[in-house]
Image (spheres, rainbow, N blue to C red):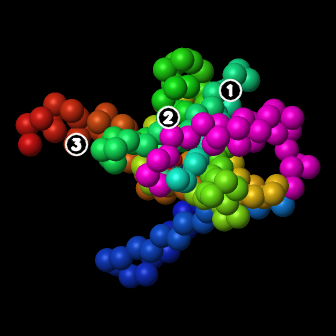
């Protein structure tokens, strides 16, 4: 969860401080068998990436509230913007196949030149937005496991820690921005 601290600087301006909570693990000892399985699946999925342009293979695995798991990888396209990130492929697949089950977690890992990358590769902005959509849809926090080479894992307990001030469909319900009103702008 992100914490917001509000301090009043003067009458006209308020300052917000946002705290992001991130856990860094150097090995898998703290993780459950279910989580370790998720990590294995994400690694395996990276082998199936279609990356003739970037050669950057990303694997993702999604854990659902009922224990079901889905995995996927980035799928590039000669028309570059038509390509999809691993996280989006996997979350969309999970959403399409288990439409009524909340997403509990997502693990992500990347390979370059045939080896897992040392850096912890954080999901891109677009994928954070897609994660936020599913967190919002089920009103259930999604844990994000950002994996690196060896047994390094960074854990974020909610998408809100990766995407503060995220945009959500809530605005469509507000009096000021209903879809009807937007159409009239
Ligand atoms: N990529 C992902 O799959 N996930 C991300 O969060 C960042 C980027 C993919 C997109 C593209 O196929 C390749 O990595 C290089 O950007």
Residue assigned mark 3: 176
Residue carrying label 1:
69
Which residue is at a point 60% across and 65% down the rendered structure image?
19
Instruction: State if disc 3 and disc 1 touch (CB < 8 Å).
Output: no
Indicate yes or no: mark 1 CB to ligand 1 under 8 Å. Answer: no
Other-residue count near label 2 (Cα within 10 Å), few / some / many at <14 / 14–19 / ≥20: some
- Look at the image and tell me in which quarter the C terminus lies: top left
Residue that numbered label 2 is attached to: 89
In the picture shown, does residue 174 fall above or below 24?
above
- Above or below: residue 98 compared with residue 51: above
Q: What residue is drawn where x is 64% and y is 40%? A: 47
Along the viewing direction, whichever of 51 and 12 lies nearer the viewer: 51
Q: Is residue 21 left or right of 151 when viewed as pictured?
A: left
Of callouts 1 and 3, the N-terminal one: 1
Q: Is residue 21 visible?
A: no
Instruction: Find residue 131 and report its horizontal and vertical position in percent.
Output: 51, 41
Q: Is 46 positioned to the left or the right of 23 in the image?
A: left
Mark 1 and mark 3: span between their CA atoms? 39 Å
Pointer 2 and pointer 1: residues touching (CB < 8 Å)? no
Mark 2 close to ligand 1, CB under 8 Å: yes
Measured along the vertical axis of the image, is residue 160 above or below residue 185?
Answer: below
Examine the structure image and report whether residue 50 is included in the region drawn in magenta: yes
């Amino acid at each position: 969860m992100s914490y917001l601290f509000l301090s009043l600087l003067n009458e006209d301006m308020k300052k917000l401080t946002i705290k992001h909570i991130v856990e860094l693990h150097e090995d898998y000892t703290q993780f459950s068998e279910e989580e370790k399985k998720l990590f294995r699946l994400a690694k395996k999925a990276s082998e199936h990436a279609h990356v003739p342009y970037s050669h950057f293979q990303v694997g993702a695995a999604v854990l659902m509230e009922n224990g079901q798991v889905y995995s996927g990888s980035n799928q590039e396209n000669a028309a570059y913007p038509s390509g999809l990130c691993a996280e989006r492929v996997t979350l969309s697949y999970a959403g399409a196949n288990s439409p009524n089950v909340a997403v509990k977690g997502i693990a992500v890992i990347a390979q370059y030149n045939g080896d897992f990358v040392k850096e912890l590769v954080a999901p891109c902005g677009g994928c954070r937005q897609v994660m936020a959509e599913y967190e919002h849809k089920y009103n259930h926090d999604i844990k994000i496991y950002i994996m690196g080479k060896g047994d390094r894992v960074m854990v974020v307990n909610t998408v809100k820690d990766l995407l503060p001030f995220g945009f959500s469909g809530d605005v469509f319900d507000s009096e000021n921005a209903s879809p009807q009103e937007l159409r009239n702008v």
